[in-house]
């Protein structure tokens, strides 16, 4: 069954005191476009992330948001910047002498100085980072696919209903088309009769009727339209990405409908063609969101 390009998924995992959270948001796009926002610690894993997403999501604009937090075990440890602390102590000692003040320098005062005490992340092996991130990413991708599949099923149901309407409209067009030249022939004869018996060469009249009938003939367009319709119907049940194929077929269906409309020369036939094109436009809008 076809899938929608729109969806959302979220996944979480923990490893070595780090908690990973992955959010994936996907919308329709002509091609595949993956954008990742991740902490510095995970920058080296971006190619791996993109490859894993691309193996599941073939088409669409995909935004991936990855957050990393400490949990459980200590993921960062305090580190004293000793050269900076020594420099501050020398400055405090010099100020005590220069300004003739008394009182020692407290630990609180020293720690209050910027960058004397900092937090450094505990090194985590890349394979452990990869394992934790992959678990969170796979959970997010699974949730994304569930939503995309569900929306795809709803889209497929709507498209199949409209394909049924197209078939009905085409049957009405096929039934009406042969009557157009016959009615035109009758009207022509009536006009000539009103002008008198001597007006109009019968052979010339027959030739004009034949030319008109040829201009109104839409049998080739109907045959191609039916062929494209059959191909389109088969794509709806496909599990592989078929959005581009559907988009192409909708263009071809529109092309045939336009030609039928230009040949109609009949108000009722034109009305049916307009309804046909209206349903095709609704299908085209749905196709824009199919992977």
Image: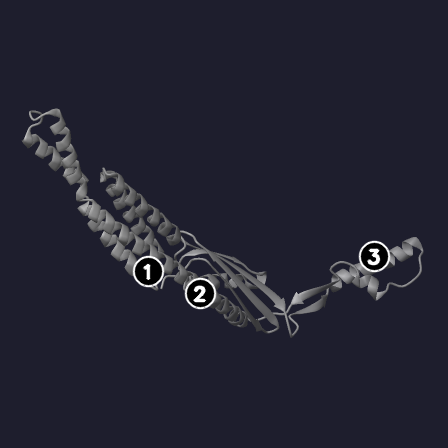
Is label 1 or label 3 in front? 1
Q: Residue at x 14, y 32 (%)?
A: 190
| Sequence-first tag of 1 and 2 | 2
Above/below status of 211 relative to 6: above
| Sequence-first tag of 1 and 3 | 3
Q: Decide if residue 49 is on the left or right side of residue 196.
A: right
Q: Give x and y (percent) for residue 134.
A: 50, 69
* Quarter of the picture holding the C terminus: bottom left
| Marking on residue 188 | none
Q: Residue at x 36, y 48 (%)?
A: 281
Label 2 and label 3: CA atoms lie apart by 61 Å
| Marking on residue 91 | 3
Q: Residue at x 62, y 73 (%)?
A: 17
Label 3 CA crowd tier, 10 Å (few <14, some 14–19, many 20+): few
- As helix, strand or loop, the secondary structure at mark 3 comes to helix
| Marking on residue 145 | 2
Q: Decide if residue 254 is on the left or right side of residue 20.
A: left
Label 2 CA crowd tier, 10 Å (few <14, some 14–19, many 20+): many
Label 1 and label 2: CA atoms lie apart by 17 Å
| Sequence-first tag of 2 and 3 | 3
Residue linked to disc 1: 236
Q: Decide if residue 290 is on the left or right side of residue 97.
A: left
Q: Residue at x 36, y 52 (%)?
A: 283
Above/below status of 265 relative to 9: above
Q: How many marks?
A: 3
Do the numbered discs 2 and 3 sit on residues whose CB atoms are within 8 Å? Answer: no
Q: Give x and y (percent) for residue 204.
A: 8, 30
């Amino acid at each position: 069954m076809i899938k929608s390009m729109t969806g959302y998924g979220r996944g979480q995992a923990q490893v070595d005191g780090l908690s990973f959270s992955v959010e994936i948001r996907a919308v329709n796009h002509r091609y595949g476009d993956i954008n990742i926002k991740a902490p510095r610690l995970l920058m080296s894993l971006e190619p791996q992330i993109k490859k894993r997403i691309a193996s599941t999501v073939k088409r669409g604009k995909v935004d991936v948001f990855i957050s990393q937090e400490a949990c459980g075990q200590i993921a960062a440890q305090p580190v004293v910047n000793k050269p900076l602390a020594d420099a501050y102590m020398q400055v405090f000692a010099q100020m005590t002498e220069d300004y003739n003040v008394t009182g020692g320098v407290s630990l609180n005062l020293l720690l209050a100085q910027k960058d004397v005490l900092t937090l450094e992340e505990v090194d985590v092996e890349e394979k452990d980072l990869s394992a934790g991130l992959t678990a969170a990413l796979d959970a997010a991708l699974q949730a994304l696919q569930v939503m995309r599949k569900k929306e795809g099923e709803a889209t497929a149901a709507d498209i199949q209903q409209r394909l049924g309407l197209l078939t009905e409209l085409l049957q009405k067009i096929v039934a009406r088309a042969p009557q157009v030249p016959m009615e035109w022939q009758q009207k022509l004869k009536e006009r000539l009769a009103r002008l008198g018996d001597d007006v109009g060469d019968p052979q010339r009249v027959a030739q004009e009727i034949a030319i008109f009938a040829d201009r109104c003939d839409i049998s080739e367009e109907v045959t191609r339209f039916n062929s494209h319709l059959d191909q389109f119907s088969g794509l709806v049940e496909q599990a592989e990405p078929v959005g581009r194929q559907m988009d192409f077929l909708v263009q071809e269906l529109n092309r045939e409908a336009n030609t039928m409309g230009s040949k109609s020369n009949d108000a009722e036939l034109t009305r049916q063609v307009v309804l046909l094109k209206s349903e095709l436009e609704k299908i085209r809008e749905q196709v824009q969101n199919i992977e």
